[in-house]
Image (cartoon, helix red, strand yellow):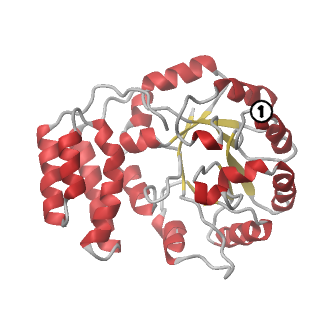
Amino acid sequence: MNYYFAPMEGITGYIYRNAHRKFFKDVDVYYTPFIVPNQNREFSSREKNDILPEHNEGIKTIPQIMTNNWEGFVWTAMELKKYGYQEVNLNLGCPSKTVVSKHRGSGFLAVPDQLDQFLDQIFSIDMKISIKTRIGKDSPEEFYRLMEIYNQYPVKELIIHPRIQTDFYRNTPNWDMFKMAVSVSKNPVCYNGDIFSPGDYQRLIQTFPSVERIMLGRGLVANPMLAGEIKGKGRLQKEQLKAFHDQILSGYQETISGDRNVLFKMKELWAYMLQSFESGEKHGKKIQKSQNLFDYMSAVEALFRDLKLKSSFDSQCE
């Protein structure tokens, strides 16, 4: 089984990826948060820092691109190739309303003919292209047509999150549609969605024994040891999680100016990591209310001192 770390905007940038790779070595591939090509044909400073080879040493990293403009996609892919990348990923999964309204992300799925024309253009370039997709915008039935389109192209991997756009992260992933995709796909298929525990993983592979690739997202941010736990390498330890946290904090302090901006990044991360602890609501509120790094660290130290890690994770919406 190959384990992939899903791209999560605002969270899984290079500071996070390097810290994760240092403390948890069971992820095979990391995907960057999406790059949106702009009219100026240049990377923002954030995007450039995220894809610089020196910021991703020893980490197999695949940049993700989100656009419905084939020329922008091709320009971005060719620029990334100059940095040494041999593969890029197309985002057809983001359910954000601001993205979807522009027919980007999973909004692109609503116009399959335009998507087909877009793919026809981008698959002419000399790079490997994988696709991360939902199963439709408004109805799972849309996925039959989408699979016909995907099967026309040499997709490196088709990463399927079996929800429609309007589900966002609610409701249960549609395994019937995923089963259909596994049976008809001419390209390798990867599963993504609602894997929060080794038990969730076992149910998946018992149902789909032929699947050899899995992408972990929110479950892996909540429990950064998840891939290792699935592999039977033991449980997440508080000391390990604390050291991981401190590494990320240190990285942000070195690269982001101002306590407020650093705190924003760390609080966003705690929205997920708090799920690793038993009865963490009270301590979580103190973390979220902290206005400076001294108060923040006091709240974090108290959380690690007072709380136990959960012995298991319940399934949640990813």
- Would residue 116 be visible to someone looking at this image? yes
Q: Quadrant of residue 247?
A: bottom left
Binning the other alpha carbons within 10 Å of mark 1 as few (below 14), some (14 to 19) or many (20 upward) gives few
Residue drawn at the location 21% of the way across and 49% of the way down: 285
Q: Nearer the viewer, residue 115 or 184?
A: 115
* Image position of 17 with respect to 38: above or below: above
Residue named by callout 1: 141
* Image position of 12 with respect to 274: above or below: below
Quadrant of the drawing holding the N terminus: top right
| Picture coordinates of residue 52, whole percent (x, y) | 52, 70
Instruction: Tell me if 150 is positioned left or right of 276 in this view.
Output: right
| Picture coordinates of residue 51, whole percent (x, y) | 54, 67
Residue drawn at the location 49% of the way across and 72% of the way down: 46
- Would residue 231 be visible to someone looking at this image? no
Q: Residue furthest bottom?
A: 40
Q: Amino acid at mark 1?
A: Glu
| Picture coordinates of residue 213, whole percent (x, y) | 61, 35
| Picture coordinates of residue 36, whole percent (x, y) | 63, 67
Q: Quadrant of residue 147?
A: top right
Instruction: Tell me if 185 is positioned left or right of 247 in this view.
Output: right
Residue drawn at the location 31% of the way across and 30% of the way down: 235
- Say what secondary structure mark 1 lies in: loop
Residue drawn at the location 34% of the way across and 48% of the way down: 271
Q: Quadrant of residue 184?
A: top right
Query: In this figure, what is the number of numbered marks?
Result: 1
Instruction: Tell me if 17 is positioned left or right of 96 in this view.
Output: left
* Image position of 160 with respect to 270: above or below: above
Q: Nearer the viewer, residue 14 or 318?
A: 318
